[in-house]
Amino acid sequence: MGYSKSEQETSLVFDYEKNEWNVYSTVPKHIRKLMNIGEMNIIESENDRPIAIKGVLKEKQVSMKKERVLSEETKEKLRLNGLAMREKTN
């Protein structure tokens, strides 16, 4: 069953001298993503599925950005633009 939700965590530690991120995760969503972007070592598995991994990522593989918060008006404009684009392609 893996780790309970209260036990799941993802840890990123930046090594400035090596210019790389050391990563450890027991969060299924993060494990799937990390396995696709870097070479990860499986620490624990259950039913041939990794439940704990660790590895190293290059500095450019990790980014930090401000959360984008859209107003209802902006969301509606984007929705209408999407509908208009679909009509043009049909």
Image (cartoon, rainbow, N blue to C red):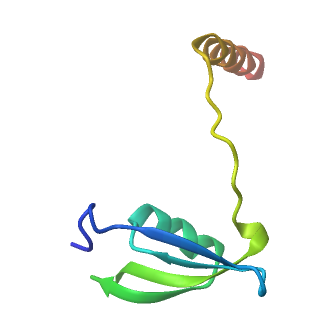
Location of residue 72 (image quadrant)? top right
Q: Is residue 87 above or below residue 25?
A: above
Task: Please indicate whether residue 71 sits to the left or right of residue 60 in the image.
Answer: left
Provide residue 26's location: percent of width, then percent of height.
39, 73
What residue do we see at 56% from left, 77% from top? 23
Q: Quadrant of the N terminus?
A: bottom left
User: Closest to the observer: 21 or 82?
Assistant: 21
User: Closest to the observer: 17 or 26?
Assistant: 17
Provide residue 21's location: percent of width, then percent of height.
66, 77
Q: Quadrant of the C terminus?
A: top right
Give the farthest residue toward the front.
16
Provide residue 22's location: percent of width, then percent of height.
60, 81
What residue do we see at 72% from left, 14% from top? 84
Location of residue 77 (image quadrant)? top right
What residue do we see at 71% from left, 59% from top? 63
Q: How many marks?
A: 0
Task: Please indicate whether residue 7 sits to the left or right of residue 60 in the image.
Answer: left
